[in-house]
Image: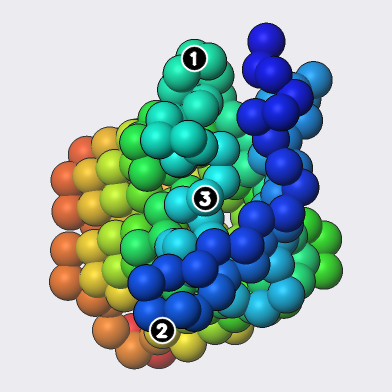
Amino acid sequence: MIPVEAFATETVVTDASGSSAYCDWKYTASTNTLYVNTDGILDGSAINSLPTYYTDGGEIFEYYNIQNINVVIGKDITKITDETWIDVNGETVATITFEEGSKLEYLGTTVCAYSLIEAIELPDSLKFIGGFQFSDCKKLTSITIPSGVATIGQSLFYHCTSLKEAVIDAPITTVPCETFRYCTALTSVKLPASV
C-alpha cells in the first residue's frame, strides 16, 4: 500500500531559469488510475514531478511495485510538449485515455512511447502528432488517427510488433519515413485518398 503522504493534488515545479510548470494530479489506488490535468501546456518539468517519476529522489510507482497504471489526460490540456514521456520507465502504463471534452491539439514526440497500451482513442481536437509517438508500444493492436490531424511525425508506430490495423483518417499527403517499421503483425492499413 502506498502511503497517502506520497501523493499530492497539485505540483508546481520551478526550473533553473525560474520558469514554472503547474500540474494537477491525483492517484486513485482502488482503480490504479493517475489523473493529470493543467490549464494549457503540460511539459516535461511538470510531468517529471508526478509520482510515476521522481519523489524524494525515487521512482515511487516502481518502489511500491505498481504496474498497469491507467493514465487519464485531463480535458484542459491543449499541448503536451515533445519528449514528455508518460511512461518514461516503459511498461508501467497500461492505458492512456483522454477526458471527455479534451482540448488537446498538440501531442509532442514520444509522449505515449514504450507504454503497454493495447488501444487508444485519440481526441478529435488533435491537430499534431509528433514522431515516435507510439514507438515500442508492443501491445498496441489497432489505432485510428482522427481526421483533424494535419501533421504526423516520422516513425509513428516504430517497433509496434503487435499492431495489426492502422487507420489514418488525417488528410496527410505523404506517409512519413519509417511509420510502420518493424510492425511485423500489420495486416491492414487504411490511408486517406490524399496520399
Q: Amino acid at mark 2?
A: Thr
**Element type at mark 2:** strand
Callout 3, which amino acid? Answer: Ser
Question: Could you say which disc has been placed on residue 65 in the image?
Answer: 1
Closest to the camera, between mark 1 and mark 3, is: 3
Mark 1 in CB contact with mark 3 (< 8 angstroms): no
Residue at image coords 65%, 29%: 6
Residue 188 on image: x %, y %: 38, 51
On the question of residue 5 being in view, the answer is: yes
In the image: residue 88, left or right of residue 9: left
User: Which badge, 1 or 3, is on the more N-terminal residue?
Assistant: 3
Q: Is 139 on the left-hand or right-hand side of 118?
A: left
Q: Would you say residue 130 is visible in this rendering?
A: no
Q: Mark 2 against mark 3, which lies toward the viewer?
A: 3
Q: Residues within 10 Å of mark 3 (few under 14, many from 20)?
A: some
Q: Which residue is mark 3?
A: 49
Which label sits in the foreground, 2 or 1?
1
Quadrant where the C terminus is found in the figure: bottom left
Alpha carbon of mark 2 to alpha carbon of mark 3: how far?
Answer: 29 Å
**What numbered label is drawn on residue 151?**
2
Vertical placement of residue 71 versus 82, above or below? above
Label 1: element kind: loop
Report the amino acid beneath label 1. Answer: Asn
Earlier in the chain: of badge 2 and badge 3, it is: 3
Q: Nearer the viewer, residue 171 or 111?
A: 111
At which x and y percent is residue 48? Answer: 46, 52
Residue located 38% across and 79% down the image: 17
Mark 2 / mark 1, whichever is N-terminal: 1
Circle 2 residues within 10 Å: few <14, some 14–19, many ≥20: some
> Spatial distance from mark 1 to mark 3, Cα to Cα?
18 Å
